[in-house]
Image (tube, grey):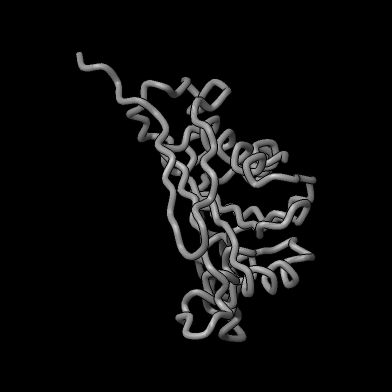
Amino acid sequence: MEILECITEQIAATRLPLVGVTLAAVACPDTPIILTLHWHGFIKEQRAERESADIAALMPVPSTSLQLNGRWSDLMDLELATLEAGWELGAWDLVRSQRPGCMRPGAPGREALECLQAFGNSPTRYHGNDLVVSATPDADELIKVAGHSGYLCWQFRPIYGGLWAEVREDATLNADGKRTPQCPLSPLSPRGEGAHRTVYKFGKAPAAA
């Protein structure tokens, strides 16, 4: 999976600081993965509220959701690629959430919203504007599978190209905020059914003076 390459390409193209990265997948081999990049920044939107004057409003830059179609046969391969992306991009940690299907009886309504958001299909809008720009043609099918069978979601906050570039109390970071490959941590298998949370801690505190 070209997760790391896709993120770095988007950073270079957008030239905005990243707040965080989210990946979502269902546990079915060779299904697409949804990568969502959350940007920090604002854009001006012209509003013609009066005939004689245009009023500019600052709107948050929408997140970007992309569909990755690389083939994979084992969740551990996907986990390893995600670990490597978080490690090389200087993240403090990587959080993997196992989430059950939101279509089960008695599931709280927020789980359905979280599922939609994870796969780049957020129904939430801000002053009539979408908060996510999606290029995810198979998202609806993935959401159906996730709603019945559950899904996995990975999240991390990069130092390289990120909002957190000035906060680098980490002896493992290079001058540009990246780390030297390869990630020293091994992927852990998902734990049974239901909701579980796994945290991979990266980095090392600087030595005391």
**Residue 98: x, y in percent?**
51, 58
Q: Is residue 20 above or below residue 160?
A: below
Left or right placement of residue 149 versus residue 201 in this view: right
Left or right placement of residue 35 versus residue 164 in this view: right
User: What residue do we see at 77% from left, 65% from top?
Assistant: 138
Image quarter hosting the N terminus? top right
In the picture as drawn, the residue positioned furthest to the left comes out as: 209
Q: Is residue 172 above or below residue 27?
A: above
User: What residue do we see at 79% from left, 46% from top?
Assistant: 71
In the picture as drawn, the residue positioned furthest to the front comes out as: 192
For the residue pair 136 and 154, the one nearer the viewer reads as 154
How many marks can you see?
0
User: What residue do we see at 56% from left, 46% from top?
Assistant: 16
**Residue 86: x, y in percent?**
53, 38
Left or right placement of residue 149 versus residue 67 in this view: left
For the residue pair 59 and 88, the one nearer the viewer reads as 88
Q: Is residue 164 above or below residue 54?
A: above
Image quarter hosting the C terminus? top left
**Residue 146: x, y in percent?**
64, 68
